[in-house]
């Protein structure tokens, strides 16, 4: 579907209910952890390509407990596998929602910036003849001063 302007709002009550629902999700997953970048680098990754391998390993472990050392906890292995598949399913749903929120935010933000640029152009033009608008025009123009400096510095360094 092609992008169309979004014309919507979220009521304060809906915002509170959405936040409460997100808090409920977090409460239902109290075991979630946060890993450092270094910790993430060190861990094996179980992606889609590994799923069949892990699934077959679970089946092999359950069917052949006698070949595994007594210290290997088959039940914990199966529980971790089940949790991993459940979290993968949940993550897929959350990513779909996040993608929609992100795309909508990008579109609405773009529309808002476009409208803001229109306002800025009119304020700059009107500031030439309307008392009191010069300060507003300068305030709005601050957004572009940093960009201009960044571009000028980039151009100077590439010369």
Image (spheres, rainbow, N blue to C red):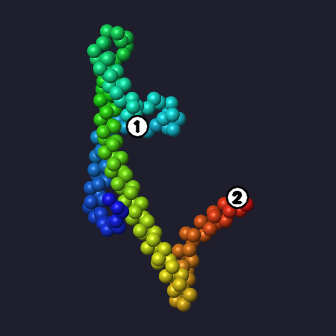
User: Which residue is painted at 30% across and 66% down in the image?
Assistant: 8
Is residue 80 in view?
no
Q: Could you tell me residue 57's position as x and y percent?
A: 34, 21
User: Which residue is painted at 26% across and 61% down in the image?
Assistant: 13
User: Which residue is painted at 39% across and 65% down in the image?
Assistant: 108
Query: Splitting the image into 4 quarters, where does residue 143 fall?
Result: bottom right
In the rendered image, the vertical position of residue 41 relative to residue 26, given as above or below: above
Residue 43 versus residue 110: which sits nearer the camera?
Answer: 110
Answer with mark 1 or mark 2, whichever residue precedes in sequence: 1
Gap between marks 1 and 2 measured at Cα: 44 Å
User: What residue does disc 2 label?
Assistant: 158
Provide the secondary structure element on which disc 1 rests.
Answer: loop
- Badge 2 local density, few (<14 within 10 Å), some, or many (20+)? few
Query: Splitting the image into 4 quarters, where does residue 9 fall?
Result: bottom left
Query: Splitting the image into 4 quarters, where does residue 60 fall?
Result: top left
- Image quadrant holding the C terminus, namely bottom right
Provide the secondary structure element on which disc 2 rests.
Answer: helix
In the rendered image, the vertical position of residue 76 relative to residue 102, given as above or below: above
For residue 7, side relative to residue 46 (left or right): left
User: What residue does disc 1 label?
Assistant: 33
Q: Could you tell me residue 134's position as x and y percent?
A: 56, 83
Q: Could you tell me residue 148's position as x and y percent?
A: 62, 68
């Amino acid at each position: 579907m092609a992008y169309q302007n979004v014309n919507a709002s979220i009521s304060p009550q809906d915002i509170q209910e959405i936040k409460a629902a997100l808090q409920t999700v977090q409460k239902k997953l109290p075991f979630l952890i946060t890993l450092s970048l270094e910790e993430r680098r060190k861990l094996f990754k179980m992606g889609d390509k590994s799923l069949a391998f892990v699934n077959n390993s679970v089946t092999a472990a359950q069917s052949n407990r006698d070949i595994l050392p007594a210290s290997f906890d088959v039940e914990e292995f199966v529980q971790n596998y089940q949790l991993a598949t459940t979290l993968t399913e949940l993550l897929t749903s959350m990513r779909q929602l996040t993608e929609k929120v992100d795309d909508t935010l990008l579109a609405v933000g773009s529309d808002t910036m476009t409208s803001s640029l229109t306002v800025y152009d009119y304020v700059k033009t009107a500031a030439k003849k309307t008392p009191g608008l010069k300060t507003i025009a300068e305030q709005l123009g601050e957004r572009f001063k940093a960009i201009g400096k960044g571009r000028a510095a980039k151009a100077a360094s590439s010369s």
